[in-house]
Image: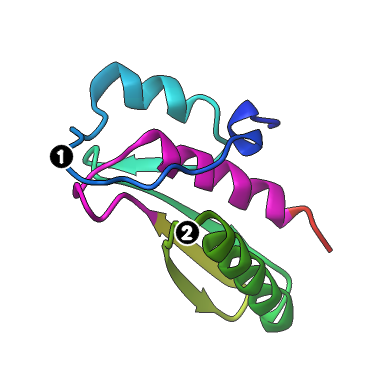
Amino acid sequence: MDSELANKECVPCRGGTPPLSGDEVKDLLRELDGWTVEQEYHLTRAFTLPDFAKSLAFVNRIGGIAEQQNHHPDIYLAWGKVRVDVWTHKIKGLTESDFIFAAKVDAAITEP
C-alpha cells in the first residue's frame, strides 16, 4: 500500500501535545498496511523475512530512518523476524509522526 505519509517528515514533539485518539488514530491507521494500534498507545508491526541476514539488514535500514527522522522506535530482531513498536515517548501516546515513521518503515521493507 502506498501512503502519502511516507513522503512527510517526522516533527519532533516538544511535549504538552495531547496524543491522538479515536477517529484520528483510525483514519491514519487506514493509510498503513499491517500495523496495529495497541490501546491507542503505540503502533506495532511484525515482519517476516527469509533469514537472519535479511532481518538484520532491515533493522539497519530502520535504524537509518530513525536517525534521519530523529524518531526512535523499539526494534526486536530474531531469525527471520523483526517487530517494530513506535510511539511518541514524550507524551506516552501517538502523534502523526508515529504514523509517518511507520509508513517509512513499510517503504524500507521493499528495498534490497
* Secondary-structure class at tag 1: loop
Disc 1 residue type (three-letter):
Gly
Task: Write the residue at 19% across / 47% down.
Answer: 91
Q: Is residue 27 left or right of residue 68?
A: left
For the residues labelled 1 and 2, say whether their Cβ atoms are less than 8 Å apart.
no
For badge 2, the amino acid type reads Asn
Q: Position of residue 92 (x, y in %)?
A: 19, 50
Which residue lies under the disc numbered 1?
A: 16
Nearest the eye: 19 or 40: 19
Q: Residues within 10 Å of mark 2 (few under 14, many from 20)?
A: some
Queried whether the magenta region covers residue 102, the answer comes back as: yes
Which residue occupies 54% across, 65% down? 67
Nearest to N terminus: mark 1 or mark 2: 1
Q: Is residue 45 left or right of residue 65?
A: left
- Taking the view exactly as shown, the residue that stands out farthest to the front is 14
Location of residue 57 with respect to 83 vertically, above or below: below
Please report the bounds of the magenta region as a residue range: 86-109
Residue 105 drawn at (x, y percent): 60, 52
Place of residue 99 in the rendered image (x, y in percent of width and height, measured from the top left): 46, 38
Q: CA distance from mark 1 to mark 2?
A: 19 Å
On the image, the x and y values in percent for residue 51 come to 71, 78
Q: Which residue is mark 2?
A: 70
Image-quadrant location for residue 64: bottom right
